[in-house]
Amino acid sequence: MTGPSQNQDARPLLEVENLVTRFDLRSGLFGRVTGRVHAVENVSFSIARGETLALVGESGCGKSTIARTVMHLDRPVSGSIRFEGEETVGVSSQKLQSFRRHVQMVFQDPFASLNPRMTIARALIDPMLVQGAGGCRADMRRKAAELLKRVELNETHLDRYPHAFSGGQRQRICIARALALDPKLLIADEAVASLDVTIQAQVINLLMDLQAELGISLLFISHDMAVVERVAHRVAVMYLGEIVEIGDRRSVFGNPQHPYTRKLLGSVPVADPRRRPERRTLMVDEIPSAVRPPDYTPVQRPMHRISDTHFVRAESHAA
Amino acid sequence: MAEAQSTAKRSRFDFGYFGYQLKRSPLTMVGLIMVVLVLIVVIFAPVFATHDPNAIDLRARLAPPSMAHFFGTDEVGRDIYSRILFGGRQSIAVGFFVVFLAGLTGTVLGALSGLIGGRTDTVIMRLMDVVLSVPSLALILALAAALGPSLVNAALAIAIVRIPFYVRLVRGQALIVREMAYVKAAHTFRAGRLHILRWHILPNTLSPVIVQGTLDLGSTILLASALSFIGLGAQQPTAEWGAMVATGRNYILDQWWYSGFPGFAILFTATGFNLFGDGVRDMLDPRQKAR
């Protein structure tokens, strides 16, 4: 695994600070706000160039909302998202346009991610067409062929329809499509969760190779600790909209501080019975709801420093 | 099982699969043959016709079917067989015109409604509810009477009444497609609404529209004939099936062929389109087959 390459710029590529995203729940005749989903609560992290940050946690803990907010698909309540040092929250949509090119996303379900009525070539050309960034048709097609090669698929597949491909192949096509605009940051939202384990490994290796080749940064969202241990340089553990522990992979996996992190790690199956820990605190209870009354003010808990690269949130509620 | 497999593997319009389905469904095949037959006969009416459809021959008034006049003649001696061939052009043209107009308008409105949502959606859908809340035949009659009796106005009236069905169909489909990950992916690279409408929503809503259109053809032809029958459609001396049945009614006891043959032409065409339409629906939506 290659370490984070801090070549040209010491500044992180993406800096997220005190990000808050909430969704209003309305009900009744006049659509009064009767509650809020505190999906993302005071989240801060940064991603360096060429680095992979993994965001882990159970479903419903706000991982995907962070991705969607960073993509500006959801509007944050407050906080700042800086890309290459430039603020992107609250700027004009024209300015956003160029930023969006640099951040692309791969979704969880490879079967729903490709339009069944578009050939692979057309799907790969689509982002270039929208952004007006491909030159003439022939150029775009050539670029599409290159992209396919990049994700280790044959360019003879260009004129086929998505139904002719397996889940793993489709996910690679999705990655190719995300690369069409030469992004600097790729967000993989549970991108391997719905694939077979062997295919998962292929796709993960592909992502890591691409990262080594192109120097792109990855925000890797997953609930699977085993996968995360393989791809991540740094890991952020999320619980109920908050990051409860963040640090480099070795520290988080080797020296987990927060009880929730320990529980997550405890849920990874271990093949060798002799290496299985004596007592594992398995998670049996459901994750508490993030829905709060409208007048709720979130509790601010400080982060404790464990080492230079490892921070943990103070506990107050039982995680 | 094998069938589900082939459905999943089918792209745009696979003629091999279409042929395979046709073979499995004899009624659809019959419907297709009937439709093709009618279309050929009507398109090449000048070739098949034995007489000028509007030529009056007072020596041969109300003549029974014979070798000279296959389906007999009417009260001024016009050849009914030739009039049916040319009259079919009117009826079938109305059918296609109505389906095209209603289908296009309905698809655009439905897609906009589903994609944009909010107030646009509410306005469009409530408008459609208004149209739907009036019994369709009464509305068609009122519209056709208000616009003035002519075949084009009758067609417009039918089209207006058919629009809501397409709007609902496409809106429902658009709501499903809108939430698909590939539309979200298009949002991530900043595709505009028009782009998403053109490239993602429309291509994925088209097959139910085609089915609905095929099914509508038969009933539209029937309706247009009915309007002509009561005098709100085609006007004399234009040959039109419904109008012919209407005039022939006066002679029905002695000259059965006058109303009988145009009536049969309507029956044949409407049955053909309905059988074919049902078959197409089953082909494009195998889940409904169990009904």
Image (cartoon, rainbow, N blue to C red):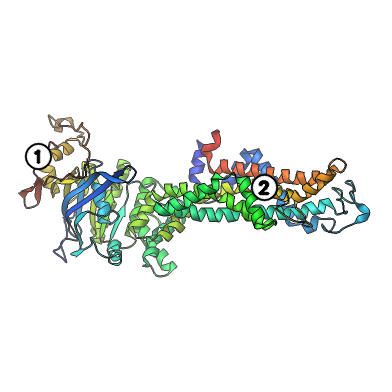
Query: Are there few (<14), some (14-19), or many (20+) residues within 10 Å of tag 1?
Result: few
**Res. A201 in view:** yes
Q: Position of residue B274 (x, y in %)?
A: 64, 43
Mark 1 belongs to chain: A
Identified at 54% across, 33% down, the residue is B290
Left or right: A255, with B209 as reference point: left
In the rendered image, residue B17, in percent from the top left (x then y), is placed at 57, 45
The circle on residue A316 is 1
Outermost residue toward the bottom in this view: A135
Q: Identify the residue under disc 2.
A: B223
Three-letter amino acid code at disc 1? Ser
Visible residue check, residue A121: no
Q: In which quadrant of the rendered image does the C terminus of chain A lie? A: top left
Q: Quadrant of residue A60?
A: top left
Q: CA distance from mark 1 to mark 2?
A: 73 Å
Q: Do tags 1 and 2 sit on the same chain? A: no
Mark number displayed over residue B155: none
